[in-house]
Image: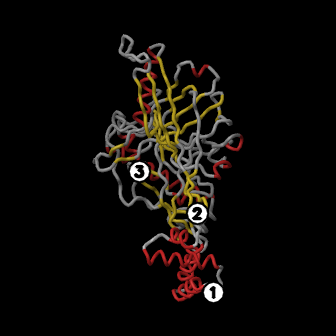
């Protein structure tokens, strides 16, 4: 992953984002090419090019780019023969075996993109003279965040890696002709939450973890649509734990705090007052004394209190963190014809390949697999308001049962009579209180259950 700004001398081959200093208050990139007049967002890499890749002389006709709302630069290529594909990096496009593609093509793309992106900055600055962006201004005035770019490049994905264009599949084949509710799995490229620096109004830089890119606006890389299975459920949970803090430890803790804020002398003075009982409740003195007695004897102050005073320490339940929700799904698929048989095989391959880790060319690193958006769709059109929403998920387990009928059986071409798949997903982040009103990322989330 790389970041581009107007200081960049070249555009990298890897997946590239326009630097987050160009984000507005809503988290959208100011250089986004998605506008009211260009809703697809795509513009020609070389405006008015009439020559295609491989022509003599070569050109870049049919190649366009877009800056997504989160700042990611994507590409689309139309070969003029009805084949249109989207790519997430220059390297991915270079690996797609376009006839006539060579290293000079890569240079033309980079040169064209540098010109386009700098022109986008200039255009924005002309329209917004009071809030210009670019290297001279850096982080906008007031509060804001700046991502910390990786200090090193982990390398490109190994040749043959597929992270986009997984295809769109529906089972059974006639599901689209009905209006029944469905479950839709959309595969996405993983986007990490990046470290950044938060600038406060006082000019202080604080380290923070920038929010992961929202699902809204993310480019789908493939979909699988299936009937909603039986047994769907969700479990929202938080971890709580019992904890004991007796009066003695509380008093000594308060003394230690005063030592940190007011000096070590104040700490010892407060401890002495507590142990001697000066100005303290007798229970506090007893509890504090038991702490020192336990430390001297190597015992437990709770046992000493129980033996000496016949009392035990009170307790309470304390919040210990959220949990990540798991989701399990089981589907049984039986082909009624060759077309459906191929779809079933493609669906199994879709999930298995999408969850697989991605190795780099040098075999030194493994990149994060693709992630998934899961939606219950009412009448195949909109999010079901009366079934809980699901945040972005990782597919942690995928099990294929090739003999769900209890015996081995195939059609004449070798395809199994039935397949049963079991999937275990887990959300990438907890559900937060604010998510229930976050309609900017989860449209119409206020209309139903929420999460």
Residue reaching furthest top? 412
Labels 1 and 2: the sequence-earlier one: 2
Labels 2 and 3: the sequence-earlier one: 3
Q: How many residues crowd around disc 3 within 10 Å: few (fewer than 14), some, or many (20 or more)?
A: some
Q: Secondary structure at mark 2?
A: loop
Q: Position of residue 366 (x, y in %)?
A: 35, 47
Q: Position of residue 17 (x, y in %)?
A: 47, 52
Q: Which residue is mark 1?
A: 278
C-alpha gap between disc 1 and disc 3: 78 Å
Q: Which residue is mark 2?
A: 132
Nearer to us in this view, 340 or 39: 340
Q: Secondary structure at mark 3?
A: helix
Q: How many residues crowd around disc 1 within 10 Å: few (fewer than 14), some, or many (20 or more)?
A: few
Q: Nearer the viewer, mark 1 or mark 2?
A: 1
Answer with left or right where residue 195 lies relative to residue 358: right
Q: How many residues crowd around disc 2 within 10 Å: few (fewer than 14), some, or many (20 or more)?
A: some
Residue reaching furthest right? 447
Query: Residue shown at 61%/63% (left/top)?
Result: 131
C-alpha gap between disc 1 and disc 2: 64 Å
Nearer to us in this view, 74 or 196: 196
Q: Quadrant of the C terminus?
A: top right
Labels 1 and 3: the sequence-earlier one: 3
Q: Which residue is mark 3?
A: 111
Q: Position of residue 274 (x, y in %)?
A: 59, 83
Looking at the image, what colour scheme do you see?
secondary structure
Q: Nearer the viewer, mark 2 or mark 3?
A: 2
């Amino acid at each position: 992953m790389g970041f581009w700004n107007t200081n960049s001398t070249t555009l990298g081959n890897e997946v590239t984002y326009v630097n987050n200093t160009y984000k507005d208050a809503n988290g959208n990139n100011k250089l986004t090419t998605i506008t009211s007049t260009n809703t697809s967002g795509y513009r020609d890499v070389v405006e008015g090019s009439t020559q295609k890749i491989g022509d003599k002389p070569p050109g870049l006709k049919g190649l366009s780019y877009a800056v997504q709302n989160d700042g990611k630069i994507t590409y689309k290529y139309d070969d003029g023969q009805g084949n249109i594909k989207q790519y997430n990096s220059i390297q991915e496009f270079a690996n797609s075996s376009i006839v006539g593609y060579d290293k000079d093509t890569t240079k033309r793309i980079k040169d064209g993109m540098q010109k386009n992106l700098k022109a986008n900055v200039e255009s924005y600055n002309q329209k917004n003279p009071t809030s210009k962006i670019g290297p001279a201004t850096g982080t906008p005035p007031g509060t804001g965040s700046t991502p910390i770019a990786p200090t090193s490049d982990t390398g490109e994905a190994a040749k043959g890696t597929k992270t986009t264009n997984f295809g769109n599949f529906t089972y059974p084949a006639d599901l689209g002709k009905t209006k029944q509710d469905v479950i839709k799995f959309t595969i996405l490229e993983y986007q990490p939450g990046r470290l950044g620096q938060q600038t406060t109004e006082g000019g202080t830089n604080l380290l923070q973890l920038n929010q992961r890119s929202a699902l809204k606006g993310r480019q789908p890389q493939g979909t699988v649509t299936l009937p909603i299975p039986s047994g769907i459920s969700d479990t929202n949970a938080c971890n709580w734990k019992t904890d004991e803090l007796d009066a003695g430890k509380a008093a000594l803790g308060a003394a230690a705090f005063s030592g940190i804020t007011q000096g070590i002398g104040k700490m010892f003075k407060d401890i002495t007052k507590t142990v001697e009982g000066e100005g303290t409740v007798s229970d506090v003195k007893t509890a504090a004394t038991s702490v020192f007695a336990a430390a001297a004897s190597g015992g437990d102050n709770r046992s000493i209190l129980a033996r000496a005073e016949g009392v035990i320490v009170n307790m309470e339940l304390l919040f210990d963190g959220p949990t990540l929700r798991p989701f399990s799904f089981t589907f049984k698929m039986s082909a009624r014809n060759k077309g459906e048989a191929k779809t079933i095989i493609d669906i199994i391959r879709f999930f298995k390949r999408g969850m697989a880790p991605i190795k780099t060319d040098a075999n030194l690193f493994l990149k994060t697999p693709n992630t998934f958006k899961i939606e219950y769709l009412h009448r195949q059109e909109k999010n079901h308001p009366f079934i809980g929403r699901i945040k972005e998920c990782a597919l942690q387990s995928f099990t294929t049962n090739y003999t769900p009928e209890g015996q081995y059986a195939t059609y004449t071409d070798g395809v199994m009579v039935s397949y049963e798949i079991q999937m275990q997903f887990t959300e990438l982040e907890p559900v937060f209180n604010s998510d229930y009103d976050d309609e900017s990322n989860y449209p119409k989330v206020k209309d139903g259950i929420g999460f």
